[in-house]
């Protein structure tokens, strides 16, 4: 990822691109796992213990779908059916960096104006966030991290683009983003002079799996179409561990597929660019 530093009063055409040193990631290891200003134990639900996933459906009436829903996410993607699915058209633009540790993940709130279009339907990108380890599995295989790019259409239906991340080479986009990993829960940090582009996190091959599902946190609403990129991207062990220091496990367990159709796109990768 290229982070663009916009100096006050400077025209956009004179932006200066700056790359942050890899050593900055090591600062993330100085963050204690629970050094935030708010106590994780005070949050209404969690990923373990008495407020963990097996208890979400009973925690509040509004959370009942977490227990009774039949199209819950995440799932293990298995026995996918080849289909002539339309390529996803990504129209992501630069956004000022707005990052928050919300007590459950690190979330980047995205400026309006970026979108995806699938079969003529447009969805606006509203935020993206991370899970460790991955929530989605492919044929029983978990991955080290998972990125969820969350989009919403005019009717309020969600489209979640999932990017699976595996240990390997350094990922420049993640390296630079992790420079701003927040320690405090609930306090959004805005860096107006730092511009990001969510497209930098996508794999070059845009083939995907598609299925209907839910959001993976309470209230587990079943109003989401999932588009899981078939090709994982590589991230370094250092980058994985930087996030794991904050969130050792923020992944909801697998949910039953309940006979859902899982489709696998078969278009040529060049058609999706």
Image: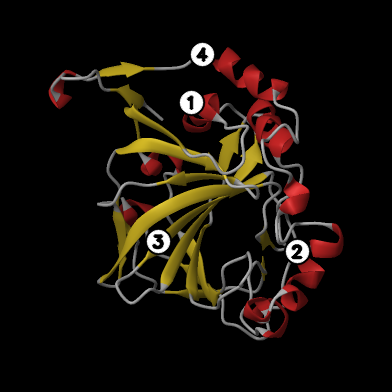
Residue that label 1 marks: 176
In the rendering, at what x and y percent does residue 116 appear? 32, 59
Between discs 4 and 1, the one toward the N terminus: 4
Q: How busy is the neighbourhood of tag 1: few (under 14 within 10 Å), some, or many (20 plus)?
A: many
Residue that label 4 marks: 21
**Residue 26, above or below 270:** above
In the rendering, at what x and y percent does residue 223 appear? 49, 77
Residue 164 seen in the current view: no
C-alpha separation, residue under disc 3 versus residue under disc 4: 31 Å
Q: How is the image coloured?
A: secondary structure
Quick check: marks 2 and 4 in contact, CB under 8 Å?
no
Q: How busy is the neighbourhood of tag 2: few (under 14 within 10 Å), some, or many (20 plus)?
A: some
Quick check: marks 2 and 3 in contact, CB under 8 Å?
no
Assign a secondary structure to mark 4: loop
- 180 left or right, relative to 13: right
In front: 78, or 142? 142
Between discs 1 and 2, the one toward the N terminus: 1
Q: How busy is the neighbourhood of tag 3: few (under 14 within 10 Å), some, or many (20 plus)?
A: many
Q: How busy is the neighbourhood of tag 4: few (under 14 within 10 Å), some, or many (20 plus)?
A: few
Which residue lies at the image location 70% right of the left edge and 37% below the top edge? 246
Which residue lies at the image location 53% right of the left edge and 24% below the top edge? 179
- 200 left or right, relative to 78: left
In the rendering, at what x and y percent does residue 264 appear? 51, 69
In front: 55, or 172? 55
- 89 left or right, relative to 166: left
């Amino acid at each position: 990822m290229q982070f663009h530093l916009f100096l006050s009063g400077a025209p956009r055409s004179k932006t200066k691109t700056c790359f942050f040193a890899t050593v900055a990631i090591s600062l993330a290891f100085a963050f204690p796992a629970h050094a935030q200003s708010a106590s994780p134990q005070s949050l209404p639900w969690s990923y373990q213990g008495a407020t963990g996933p097996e208890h979400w459906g009973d925690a509040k009436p509004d959370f009942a779908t977490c227990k009774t829903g039949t199209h819950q996410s995440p799932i293990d993607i298995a026995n996918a059916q080849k289909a002539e699915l339309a390529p996803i058209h990504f129209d992501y633009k630069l956004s000022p960096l707005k990052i928050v540790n919300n007590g459950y993940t690190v979330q980047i709130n995205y400026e309006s104006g970026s979108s995806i279009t699938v079969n003529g339907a447009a969805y606006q990108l509203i935020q993206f966030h991370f899970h460790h380890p991955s929530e989605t599995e492919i044929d029983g295989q978990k991955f080290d991290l998972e990125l969820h790019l969350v989009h919403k259409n005019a009717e309020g239906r969600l489209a979640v683009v999932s990017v699976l991340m595996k240990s390997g080479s350094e990922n420049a986009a993640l390296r630079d983003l992790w420079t701003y990993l927040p320690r405090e829960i609930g306090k959004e940090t805005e860096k107006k002079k730092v511009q990001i582009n969510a497209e930098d996190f996508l794999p070059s091959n845009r083939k995907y799996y598609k299925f209907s599902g839910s959001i993976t946190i309470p209230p587990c609403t079943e109003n989401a179409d999932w588009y899981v990129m078939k090709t994982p991207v590589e991230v370094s062990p250092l980058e994985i561990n930087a996030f794991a220091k904050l969130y050792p496990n923020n992944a909801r367990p697998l949910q039953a597929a309940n006979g859902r159709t899982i489709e696998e796109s078969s278009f040529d990768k060049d058609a999706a660019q």
